[in-house]
Image (cartoon, rainbow, N blue to C red):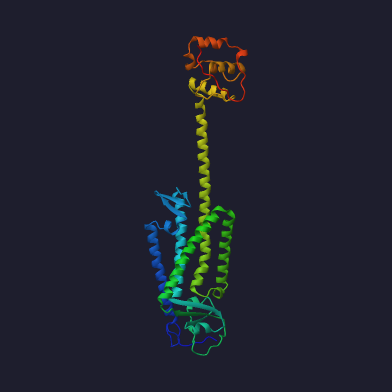
């Protein structure tokens, strides 16, 4: 049986401290505070670069260039979409934090659905109001105050009982809840960064995030239109947090899709750059054949002498070794038989001595480099 104590809508009748309408008017303070917070956040995000401060692992600015997970974003449209999703997460976090602080520092609320009398809430000092569980309650606002000091008996019909109480001011409790709100903010942002990075690099995780978005939305809408939402959500804070889950996961999915697009774009640019460098290297290859005659002679001599390990490209072979290389077919005769400047300076006698040498006087070379005599010809 619904206890009809006093008059509804604005009159207390000595049953509750405030009427339900007065409590709702006080709750508008939460809406006003949220509106002011949104204006402050929008102004800060538009005027200053706060995203690299709020998401240091995700956004960064280097020499007036915008980076997203160390990927330079040159497309202004993609950069705008990334900032839009991050701002959406900041707004959602603001709603959650303000609802938490309002719930634990200003006005505490709780709700229950059924025929049971709210004994626990009455013992804690709540002011409770009962209303029929029907959609018309949103329009008629028929909330009957419940007398917690009278007879405590069950209601005749299924009703929704909303209990409201002012929180006793305490600096210690405020400090504790502010610290918890700060931790909640950091947790949302870090989890957002982690899920975006994971889903952006894994198609399976990205599909899983999308499945969570669909399932959480269906469950929330099913509970709401099924009339059993209040059985699972007992306060405004619980309602905000349950609604924020699909919004949070959808923001993660949207941002991870942009990250995957940036990864594919970066891979294409790397492939194009590699192909351009390869084409440049191939275009530079014909320039190797246009070497001077001296360089060609030194390169041929180096190739021929590498078989026995005697000579280097910078040192031409002596006349006797040049004859030996030519007779055995090592290298070009034109590049080998031409005497060097040092050998030519020895005079005609050295050339005559070199011409009189035959195969019987030429020593057989082995794989071990032999010491070539460099004594002058007298």
Tell me if residue 183 comes above or below residue 371 in the rendering: below
Q: In this view, does 326 lie to the left or right of 168?
A: right
Tell me if residue 3 comes above or below residue 207 in the rendering: below
- Of residues 84 and 166, the one drawn nearer to the viewer in this rendering: 166
Would residue 182 be seen by someone viewing this image from the given angle?
yes
- Of residues 350 and 142, the one drawn nearer to the viewer in this rendering: 350
Name the quadrant of the N terminus.
bottom right
- Of residues 9 and 113, the one drawn nearer to the viewer in this rendering: 113
Residue 52: image quadrant is bottom left
Tell me if residue 272 comes above or below residue 100 in the rendering: above
**Could you say where residue 176 lies in the image, as x and y percent from the top left?**
44, 72
Residue at the spot 58% in from the left edge and 18% down from the top edge: 325
Would residue 27 be seen by someone viewing this image from the given angle?
no
Extreme residue toward the bottom, this view: 151
Residue at the spot 48% in from the left edge and 20% down from the top edge: 294
**Could you say where residue 289 lies in the image, as x and y percent from the top left?**
51, 24
């Amino acid at each position: 049986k619904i206890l009809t104590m006093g008059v509804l809508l604005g009159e207390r009748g000595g049953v509750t401290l405030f009427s339900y309408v007065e409590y709702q008017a006080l709750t508008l303070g939460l809406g006003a505070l949220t509106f002011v917070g949104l204006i402050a956040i929008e102004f800060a995000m538009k005027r200053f670069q706060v995203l690299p401060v709020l998401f240091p692992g995700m956004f960064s600015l280097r020499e007036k260039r915008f980076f997203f997970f160390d990927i330079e974003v040159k497309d202004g449209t993609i950069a705008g979409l990334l900032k839009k999703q991050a701002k959406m997460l900041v707004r959602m976090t603001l709603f959650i934090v303000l609802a938490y602080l309002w719930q634990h520092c200003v006005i505490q609320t709780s709700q229950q659905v059924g025929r049971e009398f709210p004994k626990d809430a009455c013992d804690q000092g709540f002011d409770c109001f009962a209303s029929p569980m029907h959609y018309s309650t949103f329009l008629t606002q028929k909330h009957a105050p419940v007398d917690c000091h009278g007879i405590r008996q069950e209601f005749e019909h299924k009703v929704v009982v909303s209990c409201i109480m002012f929180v006793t001011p305490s600096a210690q409790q405020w400090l504790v809840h502010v610290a918890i709100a700060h931790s909640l903010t950091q947790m949302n942002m870090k989890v957002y960064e982690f899920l975006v990075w994971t889903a952006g690099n894994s198609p399976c995780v990205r599909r899983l995030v999308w499945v969570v978005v669909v399932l959480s939305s269906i469950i929330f809408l099913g509970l709401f239109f099924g009339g059993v939402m209040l059985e699972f959500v007992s306060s405004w804070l619980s309602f905000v947090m349950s609604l924020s889950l699909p919004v949070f996961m959808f923001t993660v999915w949207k941002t991870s899709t942009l990250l995957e697009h940036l990864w594919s774009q970066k891979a294409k640019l790397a492939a194009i750059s590699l192909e351009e460098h390869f084409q440049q290297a191939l275009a530079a290859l014909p320039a190797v054949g246009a070497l001077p005659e001296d360089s060609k002679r030194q390169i041929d001599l180096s190739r021929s002498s590498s078989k026995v390990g005697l000579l280097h490209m910078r040192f031409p072979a002596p006349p006797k070794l040049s004859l030996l290389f030519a007779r055995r077919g090592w290298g070009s005769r034109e590049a080998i038989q031409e005497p060097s400047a040092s050998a030519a300076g020895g005079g005609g006698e050295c050339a005559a001595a070199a011409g009189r040498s035959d195969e019987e006087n030429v020593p057989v070379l082995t794989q071990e480099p032999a010491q070539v005599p460099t004594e002058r010809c007298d």
